Image (tube, grey):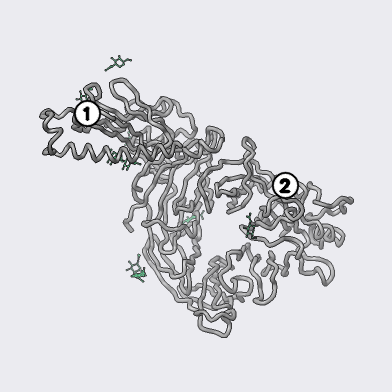
């Protein structure tokens, strides 16, 4: 449990060169910090790389569904439990002669009990978890797939369960979005979607219950592509359904959704006209006012660069209410397609139009594009934190394809990528990520461990006022000589928390007594022989700062595109001896990170330079020379 978790601030500098976004998005050179503690981990073993994670908010425990096994762990008490859910060999096996396996694919609360469903060797089955024991539960049909299926999604809302999982092994070739429990069963018409790949579904309650909606997000084949090769092959969509849909009138449509409509979901940067077409993940940030509920969409482009676009549910509902239907020219029926009707069925004529023209002519544009970057993000979570001044900031947790998490804050003047977190002891793919918005914690699982992290990781920043404030982390502020979490504020009753949650930070943000420049006087003495070469390097610390080596008032600028600030002395001369300080400057903030004093060896003589090196310094100088040369080569390549 003591394995440190590494936190790195970000290397997005190359990105900001490539993608022109507002300065607000400029981020950062990496710094590598050992995570100061606060994370806890539970190791487990899975054989097939399959993991689902369940954590109920405001609790301290997690459940992990794997292959043939359920793991339970309580981070507070260390209580743990492993339960076998091994499939017994049945006749089923989906016709394959493979060992029977039970992939647990669904762990959710349903009717106040934990519902666990798995493939159970091609025989989808559900159990409940009661008193640390598994007991039989509802029929697994539609709740778990027959075999592992990335397109299997289940949404539980009160008594209602919605699912994209087919119910029978040998039919139901067309993927559908169904209501399988609660109110009467419904499924989408065959015409509704083409080869859909589902991403996420959510229920959005409105002011009147009859108007409650289901939104689901998916990608599908683009029919336009067949007619127009300039069109995209696949498109991202949002579909809207009325939760109170009663199905059609007449036996042919009685079990069909009658309120289905879909719209293309766009995510683009208007400044550069870059489009991000492939929806990857969705996170819903609920609001007390339904129309202000926000949908955060994580998109990729054809190079797997990422963008995050935000949509308001109010805009979405309006689009579905007002857009013409694509390809439909006649007058719309009085009850508009997609309209929810209180206590009654959708009129037949309305359904006929909706079923034959399920797509809106207008596209759903984002309200805002938060950023785009070169990173390949795979999952998104959003948390709202109240900063010291009471303002609310949204913080994005984005899982990368490298097994790390980027913490990106929405500041007053744009987003900023503030931290890279490496949650696992060893690099591993992030299989699942869950946010606890009550306890302000993050749960992340790989195939071999689950980690609990506090969202406020103020120990990642140096304990000096400027480092803490310039981090712009809405969770952290400077208080009583420490970089402190906003959640610790209650404990320091009389303490105020100093923060600056903007890109531009006023120069007097920290009182002068808070300045720390301890490094300025420490000098790392290095003996360098005349005429030899030397290589100075300085590990870049702050993300948004400029760095330079300063020698006798001369500032030697080092490119900001590479990790370290380096300076290569080709041939040592008398003028080049002396103190070199690596200075970082961000706006008015200036800090000395390290000082190196290059001194001439007193006993140096010409003979020594030719002969062997008794003191050892020449060897190290030449080592650093070769390393330097190597680095210069790298830098050169990077600049190219
Ligand atoms: C995981 O499996 C390895 C080898 O199969 C074993 O040594 C280790 O103890 C297991 N760990 C746990 C937590 O079960
Ligand atoms: C979280 O749990 C605590 C203790 O059980 C309880 O007092 C509190 O009301 C809960 N908070 C929420 C938001 O459910
Ligand atoms: C699991 O529980 C056992 C006691 O049942 C305990 O000894 C062990 O430390 C626990 N494992 C972890 C990782 O906390
Ligand atoms: C479109 O989707 C299909 C699967 O439906 C996938 O195989 C293909 O790679 C996708 N094409 C693009 C350009 O994303
Ligand atoms: C509160 O203020 C008092 C005196 O002003 C100080 O001694 C004490 O350390 C402060 N407490 C905290 C938690 O900051
Ligand atoms: C270099 O730094 C050392 C240690 O801080 C100091 O004693 C010395 O005076 C400095 N030399 C110059 C030329 O500034
Ligand atoms: C950079 O300098 C540090 C000391 O500040 C040293 O440990 C490291 O090896 C140097 N790196 C290279 C590539 O020379
Ligand atoms: C940057 O400097 C740090 C320490 O100063 C060193 O560990 C690291 O290897 C350097 N990185 C490069 C790319 O030179
Ligand atoms: C550095 O520059 C300042 C002002 O530009 C000057 O006062 C000071 O004497 C200079 N110091 C050295 C060592 O040249």
The residue at label 1 has a CB less than 8 Å from ligand 7: no
Checking the image for residue 473, the label placed there is: none
Using the rendered image of the protein, determine whether residue 400 is visible from the camera's viewpoint: yes
Residue 31 lies in quadrant? top left
112 vs 553: above or below: below
Q: Which residue is mark 2?
A: 363
* Residue drawn at the location 55% of the way across and 72% of the way down: 117
56 vs 563: above or below: below
Q: Residue furthest bottom?
A: 91
Give the foreground label among 2 and 1.
1
Secondary structure at badge 2 equals loop
Q: Which residue is mark 1?
A: 531
Describe residue 597's horizontal placement relative to residue 30 as left or right. left
Where does the image place residue 430, in percent across and percent down from the top left?
A: 47, 57
Where does the image place residue 577, in percent across and percent down from the top left?
A: 22, 25
Describe residue 483's horizontal placement relative to residue 166 as left or right. left
């Amino acid at each position: 449990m003591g394995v440190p978790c590494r936190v790195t601030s970000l290397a997005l500098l190359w990105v900001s060169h490539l993608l022109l976004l507002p300065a607000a998005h400029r981020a950062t050179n990496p710094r590598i910090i050992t995570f100061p503690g606060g994370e806890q981990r539970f190791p487990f073993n899975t054989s097939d790389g399959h993991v689902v994670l369940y954590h109920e908010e405001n609790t301290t425990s997690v459940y992990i569904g794997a292959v043939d096994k359920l793991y339970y762990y309580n981070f507070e008490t260390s209580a743990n439990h492993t339960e076998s859910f091994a499939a017994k060999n049945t006749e089923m096996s989906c016709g394959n002669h493979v060992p029977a396996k039970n992939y647990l694919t669904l762990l959710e609360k349903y009717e106040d009990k934990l519902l666990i469903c798995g493939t159970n060797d091609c025989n989808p089955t559900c159990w409940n978890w009661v008193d640390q024991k598994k007991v039989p539960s509802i029929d697994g049909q539609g709740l778990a797939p027959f075999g592992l299926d990335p397109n299997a999604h289940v949404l539980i809302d009160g008594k209602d369960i919605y699912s994209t999982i087919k119910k029978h092994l040998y039919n139901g070739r067309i993927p559908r979005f169904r209501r399988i429990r609660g109110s009467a069963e419904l499924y989408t018409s065959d015409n509704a979607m083409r080869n859909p790949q589902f991403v996420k579904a959510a229920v959005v309650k409105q002011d009147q219950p009859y108007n409650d909606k289901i939104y689901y997000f998916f990608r599908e084949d683009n029919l336009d592509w067949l007619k127009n090769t300039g069109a995209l092959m696949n498109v991202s969509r949002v579909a809207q359904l009325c939760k109170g849909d009663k199905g059609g009138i007449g036996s042919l449509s009685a079990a069909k959704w009658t309120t289905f409509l879909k719209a293309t979901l766009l995510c683009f940067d208007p400044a550069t006209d870059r489009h991000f077409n492939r929806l990857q993940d969705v996170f819903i940030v609920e609001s007390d006012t339904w129309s202000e509920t926000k949908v955060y969409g994580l998109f990729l482009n054809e190079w797997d660069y990422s963008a995050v676009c935000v949509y308001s549910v109010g805009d979405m509902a309006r689009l579905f209410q007002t857009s013409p239907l694509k390809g439909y020219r006649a007058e719309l029926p009085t009850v508009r397609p997609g309209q929810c009707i209180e206590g009654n069925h959708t009129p037949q004529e309305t359904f006929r139009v909706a079923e034959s023209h399920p797509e809106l002519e207008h596209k759903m544009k984002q309200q805002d594009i938060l950023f785009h970057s070169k990173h390949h993000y795979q999952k998104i979570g959003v948390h709202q934190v109240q900063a010291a001044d009471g303002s609310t900031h949204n913080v994005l947790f984005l899982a990368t394809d490298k097994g790390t998490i980027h913490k990106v804050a929405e500041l007053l003047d744009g987003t900023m990528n503030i931290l890279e977190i490496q949650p696992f002891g060893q690099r591993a793919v992030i299989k699942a990520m869950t946010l606890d918005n009550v306890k302000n914690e993050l749960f992340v699982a790989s195939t071999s461990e689950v980690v609990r992290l506090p969202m406020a990781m103020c120990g990642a920043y140096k304990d000096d006022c400027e480092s803490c404030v310039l981090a712009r982390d809405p969770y952290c502020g400077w208080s009583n000589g420490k970089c402190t979490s906003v959640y610790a504020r209650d404990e320091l009753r009389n303490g105020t928390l100093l923060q600056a949650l903007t890109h531009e930070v006023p120069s007097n943000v920290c009182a002068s007594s808070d300045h720390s420049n301890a490094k300025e006087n420490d000098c790392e003495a290095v003996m360098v022989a005349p005429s030899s070469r030397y290589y100075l390097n300085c590990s870049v610390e702050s993300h948004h700062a400029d760095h330079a080596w300063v020698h006798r008032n001369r500032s030697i600028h080092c490119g900001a595109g590479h990790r370290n600030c380096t300076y290569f002395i080709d041939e040592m001369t008398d003028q080049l001896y002396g103190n070199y300080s690596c200075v970082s400057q961000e706006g008015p903030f200036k800090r000395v990170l390290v000082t190196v004093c290059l001194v001439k060896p007193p006993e140096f003589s010409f003979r020594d330079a030719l002969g062997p090196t008794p003191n050892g310094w020449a060897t190290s100088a030449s080592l650093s020379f070769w390393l330097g040369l190597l680095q210069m080569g790298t830098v050169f390549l990077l600049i190219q």
